[in-house]
Amino acid sequence: MGFGVMQAPLIDLAITSAPSFGVPTSERSVAAMPVRGSRNQRQPVTPSQPSHRYCAIVAGTAGSGKTALINALIRRGAEPLEAGDAWVVFRHGERPEAWAFVPGHREPRPFPDLSTIKGPVRPARRIEVAHPSPLLKRVALIDTPGRGDLDPATAEISLDAAADGLGLLFVVDAAAPLGRADLDLLTAAAERLERIAFVLTRIDQHDEWPEMLAANRALLAPRGPRLATAPWFPVSLDPASTFGVAELRHQLEAWADERAAAGARAGGVAAATVSATGDAWQEHLEREIRTRRLAAIERVSIDLATIHVRCVQELGSGKGCPELPRVLDRQLHALSVRSTRQLHTDTREVIGAVFGALLDTPPDEFVLARIAGAARRANDGNRDDGPERDRALLVTTTSGVAALTGTGALDSLSATGAAGDDPVRVLSALGIGLNAGSYAMWQPRHAPGGPPKLPDKKDCRRWLQHALREIEVELGHELSERYAELRQTLSIIAGDAVDHGVLLA
């Protein structure tokens, strides 16, 4: 499936051996390079949803030029943004400013000035940069962490965010072919995402970029039609001779138009009548919830065992104990994303199974959204503690797990800050990470007049093992509560439908 106006290759790869490609870059004009498609073919559609729901993920290996590309897309200056491991979300704002969302704090803090935080400070999960770019009124851009490569945890978080948003922009340096980690992520992306586009950067610095483009397309061809036909945008980010950025900007706007148009077409039947009688639906609902709750808790146990192995391997190599907090926090971030996604999948499937047996016809997307909306309202009404039910779980220096309540606390653990675009979501997300003290405790101690004292690896392993046991207990409790909430709210909606013979949601 193609998207926008540039689904075909931007150049004719059959001419890559022509003599013109041997001419030094300085002697030929990138503006003259053939590009297919016309921006005039795009019919503007005013988004019917808030702009923050249209997010595009910009991913790629470290040093591929992701941040420079975003700066060029929104016409932002090249001022440095030392984000470290944080996800950087570029949103529209009337004036440039930046805020850091730090786990353990309910409110964001000005970035980079975090001096208002007393005591140890852990890295931010997310940094939001406001900029008055017209593009950002339509599309928010999310830059994946620039430190390190696309490890499995970062790849999983990226794909989850891209699935909730508009899609994925994958940035590739013209000097190097796609690597194994790149191809693994892209193969998974092709299975989950509707919109993928590639950006080839630094073409002004590498005369042989057409050959590299052809090689990358050849690597992707066996991995499915979605990757084989995805558009490529060769770009030059040199401020003196920018090329290809305007076309990419219009592709993002076309994605937003397509998403808005799809939302405008949503609709369904006005009424859904009930064909089932009796109380058999209650047993069906109980069985569905119990089976999925037990499976979710079991998956968490298996995932935590895998995380333990990965962290122990890190302790035995690389930077050892000082690197443990960063590795563990990233793994827990991916675990919370994965568990939250399973919650939403189970919610959709339970509603479909239970109400598919109750109603005359299986519920379509419109009916599913109606039921989910009613469930969200009932869920909020059943809560005695209101927004305090949303809890962020933080691993402490004692290897315990503390909870910080409130939607702001949970939001500080999010990579994107977006609630997602699935109308069938009912349950609040899971969020877990390390507190500031857990980052500080495993750093070398500097004794006056002597070498730094390194932490004992045995102590690290003991702390890790105990912390993962505590996480397993707390996540199991959180999951049990959420599935209980789902059972209660769906029971109310289904009971009313049976009593009245029609779905009232």
Image: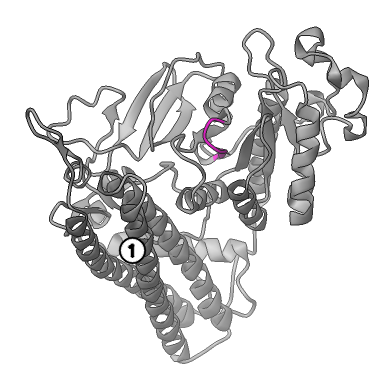
Residue 299 x/y as whole percent: 41, 72
Residue 271 x/y as whole percent: 59, 68
**Residue in view at x 44 percent, y 41 percent:** 416
Q: Which residue is mark 1?
A: 308
**Residue in view at x 75 percent, y 51 percent:** 226
Per the image, label 1 sits on a secondary structure element best described as: helix
Residue 160 x/y as whole percent: 51, 52
Q: Quadrant of residue 313?
A: bottom left
Q: Amino acid at mark 1?
A: His
Colour scheme of the picture: one colour
Residue 365 on the magenta span? no
Residue 453 x/y as whole percent: 14, 41
Q: Is residue 425 left or right of residue 189?
A: left
Which is nearer the eye, 129 or 469?
Answer: 469
Q: Can residue 429 be seen in the rendering of this structure?
A: no
What span is in magenta?
Answer: 54-63
Q: Quadrant of residue 488?
A: bottom left
**Residue in view at x 41 percent, y 17 percent:** 96
Which is nearer the eye, 20 or 502?
Answer: 20
Q: Is residue 383 above or below residue 134?
A: below
